[in-house]
Image: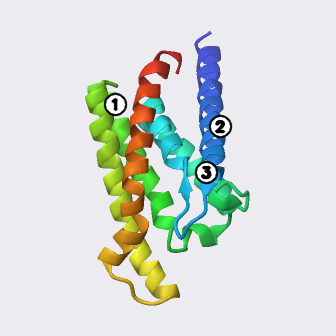
Amino acid sequence: MNNNHNISSKTKNMVICAIFVALITICSWISIPTAVPFTMQTFAIFLCAGLLGTKRSVLSIICWILIGVAGIPVFAGFQSGPSVILGPLGGYILGFIALALIVGIASEKLGRKYPVLIISMTAGLAVCYLFGTVWFVYFYGQSTGPIGFTAALSTCVIPFVIPDLAKLAAAAVLVKRLEKFV
């Protein structure tokens, strides 16, 4: 009996992670193409991290990244392959793992109250921005030519702050409404 419950629990976790991989993918495809595309993937990452906790959210995001690296077009603009991760914008994608760790740990330790969600999502987003921008400066410099940190922030972060905060707020509300179902 306990073994069946264990298998059932593992199956449930795999299905939940697969659903969130699909959600992140769909939200990545909802895109306004610019130098750094405006997408809904950040919303999906916030939702995933807030609802699934550390282990399942990090696993979902890593699976999404690996599927994209393997060649399935799950990234913004229907892109895929290692070049996306190893390109100038790959750090923002990898930064989603840190975002999920921060939100997941905070929600597991402190609960899913609005202040915890808002503060942890904001901190996770800041870490994602920082990691992604440092990555961008390095890889953009390798492929195109040197760019300063401030110029990279102006291109890759500043235009996204308000939209990302709006996505963060919407995700926090949904997390609170959906937490009893996950």
Looking at the rendered structure, the secondary structure element under dot 3 is helix
- Badge number at residue 28: 3
Question: Would you name the residue on which mark 1 appears?
Answer: 107
Q: Is residue 108 left or right of residue 79?
A: left
Mark 3: amino acid: Ser
Residue at 39 percent of width and 78 percent of height = 137
Compare marks 1 and 2 and give the one earlier in the sequence: 2
| Image colouring | rainbow
Mark 2: which secondary structure? Answer: helix
Where on the picture, by quarter, is residue 166? top left
Exactly how many numbered labels are in the figure? Answer: 3
Q: Earlier in the sequence, mark 3 or mark 2?
A: 2
Q: Identify whether 164 is placed above or below 132.
A: above
Q: Secondary structure at mark 1?
A: helix
The residue that appears at 55% across and 61% down in the rendered structure is 37
Q: Amino acid at mark 1?
A: Ser
